[in-house]
Image: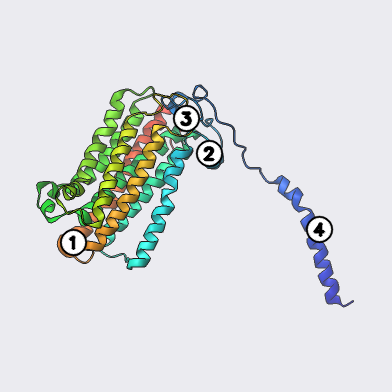
Amino acid sequence: MSSATLERLSTLSLSVQQLSRLPRLLCTLPSPPSLRGTVRASDVPSLFREPYILTGYRPVGQDWRCYLLSLFQRHNESLNVWTHLLAVPLVLLRCWVFAGTWGLALDAASLPLCLYVASALTYLCFSAAAHLLQSHSELAHYSLFFLDYVGVSVYQYGCALAHYFYSSEPAWRESGVARLFLPGAAFLGWLSCAACCFAKFRYRRPYPPRRKVCQLIPTTLAYLLDISPVAHRLATGSWAEPAMTLHALQVAFFLLAALFFSCPVPERFFPGRCDIVGHGHQIFHLFLSLCTLCQLEALFEDFLACRRDVVQVHGEEHLLLACASFPLLVLCSALTAGAMRKSVQRRLGVRLD
């Protein structure tokens, strides 16, 4: 037998010996955390309880990996996570198909559309993360929902940019509202974040009605302003345009979402029966995702109709300046959320990093 053959057999025997040790090596690796079953509302602190939701809560204080793995667990936040998480690949896939079909390039004309898509993905991801991970601790709960409010602020201004540059009509752009539209949208976007963060920090469960008022007033004002170009167009434009039905659907879905966000129905009438599937916040998430998908399609139609003229109509300098304010809003909202997080840390007695 040649020396080369003997060398190969020796190497093979060593490999077999190493493989035989593999089960023992695997046993020494840290095992993944085991998921605990869900618990009742009385078993978690009041911060984590929702009105009329009696069961399906995840225990507080588990390892972070437990909450990541709870993505595949049945609990009362499951659909809150999945309704927004599944919308992310749908948005990405639709944008990829649109860009491939129509040759979308990152230029001045398409920049508001790209920022809108980025804002939609931001709010969807931040919302999914907040609902998935918030049960880790009180500080995590506050921090993640502050991040969620940053996503809401960013999305509001992303919608305002896209509606202003693609969906508005000349008659609306000559109105007084149009002159203050973008600065007002940026301010109200930040105010929505600040008010929601403050309301979350200031009021404890059981939440008084003024907490909801504190959240709803700035977000309602922001929506009324952001949707004004579309509302004017729906009232005065031709419904023969392909985008009109999609715009009407996005408005209808948003109003339905706002209804279920404001009122804890149907769980208020069936306490304990809508804990896992069917409570109001889940329905709110579903309608909001549908609103975003219809809005995306409508903006694609509007973009195709005006892409050649948008820079000429609005002016490149004005367009770029408006888009440059987008990261500024992101920064202001993030700083506001960070400041509120530090206030929470002080209140909870958690060491400041």
Q: Which residue is mark 2?
A: 67
The three-letter amino acid code for the residue at tag 1 is Glu
- Relative placement, left or right, of 171 versus 322 is left
103 is higher (above) or lower (below) than 85: below
Q: Which residue is mark 3?
A: 275
- Neighbor class of circle 4 (other Cα within 10 Å; few <14, some 14-19, many 20+) is few
| Whether residue 257 can be seen here | yes
| Whether residue 338 can be seen here | no
Chain-order first, disc 3 or disc 2: 2
- Which is nearer the eye, 14 or 207? 207
Whole-number angstrom distance, CA of label 3 to CA of label 1: 51 Å
The three-letter amino acid code for the residue at tag 4 is Gln
- Relative placement, left or right, of 269 versus 225 is right
Q: Which residue is mark 1?
A: 317
Q: Which residue is mark 4?
A: 17
Chain-order first, disc 3 or disc 1: 3
Mark closer to the observer (1, 2): 2
Q: Residue at x 22, y 57 (%)?
A: 241
Quarter of the view holding residue 300: bottom left
- Residue 96 percent coordinates (x, y): 39, 61
Whole-number angstrom distance, CA of label 4 to CA of label 2: 38 Å
- Neighbor class of circle 1 (other Cα within 10 Å; few <14, some 14-19, many 20+) is few
Chain-order first, disc 1 or disc 4: 4
Whole-number angstrom distance, CA of label 1 to CA of label 2: 46 Å
